[in-house]
Image (cartoon, rainbow, N blue to C red):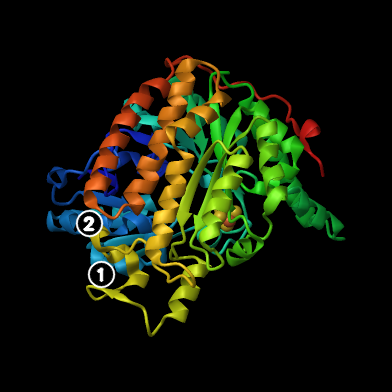
Amino acid sequence: MRVHIVNPSHFAFGVGLITTRWLYVLAAATPEKWGDPILTDEILEPFDTDRLEAGDVIGIGIHTGNALVGYQLGQRARARGAWVVYGGIHATLYPEEAHEHGGAHAVVKGDGDVVWGSAIEDCRNGVPKLLYEGGQVDAGKFRPARWDLLDRGKHLWASVQTVRGCPKHCSFCSVWRTDGQEPRQRGVNPVIEEIVELRRIGFKFVALADDNFYPVTIEDLRMADRRKDKTRYNELKTLRDERFELMAQMEQLPADMVFLTQITMEAAEDPDFLRAMKRARIMGALVGVEAVTPEGLKDVYKDFNLVGEDLVTRLKMFKQHGIHILGSFIFGLPSDTPSTFDATADLAKRADITFAQFMTLTPFPGTLDFDQWEKDNADSMPLVDGTPVSRHWLIPQSKRPKLLTPHPVMSAEEIRRRTLTVWYDFYSVRASWKRSNVVKSLKSRLAFVLMSRLYPQMFANTGLATDSARVARSTRWARMLLKALQRVCALPPMPDLQVPLSEPPAVERGTAA
Ligand code: SF4
């Protein structure tokens, strides 16, 4: 019996922008007695079901975007006599669907770090349970990824997780409901050890693939400090101190490494934190700006963000501390009008944002937006070939509507067209070259422009284009750009690199509380 673990994908690019970390974490959670699992990331190449033999176990991880292609794979695998086990956010939300549509023998709900081994064992014994409750495991039980199983030459960036969960409650996001609102923060040593392993095999760029790298804000601490009972304050302070300790340790890593992460905009109010990020060479951060108007922020329950000139000033604060922003914006909010697109594009330029992504509002399951949408349209949900659009992930890609919710003043086509225009404008060669002055050498500037061309090919054209020829062309382009960038992003391996000795925590220079 062999164990296969597969990340399904509609598109294969040959080279991946970022390592699909969960594959390597689940590999680590696979008991040794079953040997090394065979990992397939379909973002690189399609899984060949002929490799499956009767009695093999296949673990398929799905999120909403790849659920359908995952279900098709599961059905093929079951037809070959394999045991089919699903996991991932989507399977956690809809375990019964994986049984109904995906040929599942079993579904793991929640984190797979601990229960995956039991699911394999039960399959081996011919008695898999329909459902395994993985729950939210403690940070101390997070598995470090099996990077020894990675094909190094096929990835631009590596990924390490330092914390799961997010204390916010944005209406379009499922993270806080599936991963929890209480941050589960990994210890410093296991994180540093993983990063060292990645540098040993030649990674320059490492994404700290967290839900929110800044889980405790200054305001959180102030509010907790006002309480008579200091328990909460002490918990938050410990979490914050550990962040500084991690960043102090990252300072000791080779100077040619660069890190990226995901944080909330509130970090801009925290110069100590920004300075520690800079010292740790966390040079880039995805920040969810979402909307540039107060009405838009209210639409998504994100009124802790700012608007107008205050927003520009706050975003610039990151750059002033040497941290480049990948700003994330959403179009199609109920309060949007045609002028929102120009206002957003203008703000992205004025705020000195280095990269940006412009998404269209999609109610994803597990979010408040989705619940509301389903409730409001219970009797009137449109159908595509008999499938309600509230189950949009079950509609084949070619027939799936690009926008799902009707907008009060714009048609779906207008929102789609205007969104693409903002993408193309932001990533024009001229604008990208101008922004490339954030790096010095000609080689780095050219790499920056290539990356800027890659981003819309991968995330705008494949998602928003309406004709398959355009999608196919974009996939080809993305493949070429990824290959070219792979060489630029790699560093010579350092097989003898040691884990730096722990220094005293840098909390003294970090805490503002
Ligand atoms: S969008 Fe970001 S800040 Fe909001 S809940 Fe999700 S992870 Fe947290």
Find ligand 1 in the image and state its quadrant.
bottom right
Mark 2 lies on residue? 74
- Give residue 504's position: percent from left, percent from top: 73, 27
Q: Nearer the viewer, residue 9 or 87?
A: 9
Q: Is residue 355 above or below residue 364?
A: above
Q: Nearer the viewer, residue 497 or 211?
A: 211
Q: Secondary structure at mark 1?
A: helix
Q: Is residue 98 above or below residue 278?
A: below
- Give residue 313's position: percent from left, percent from top: 71, 43
State the count of labels.
2
The image's mark for residue 257 is none
Mark 1 lies on residue? 100
Q: Is mark 1 within 8 Å of ligand 1?
A: no
Which numbered disc flags the more N-terminal residue, 2 or 1? 2
Which image quarter: residue 405? bottom left
Which residue sits furthest bottom?
379
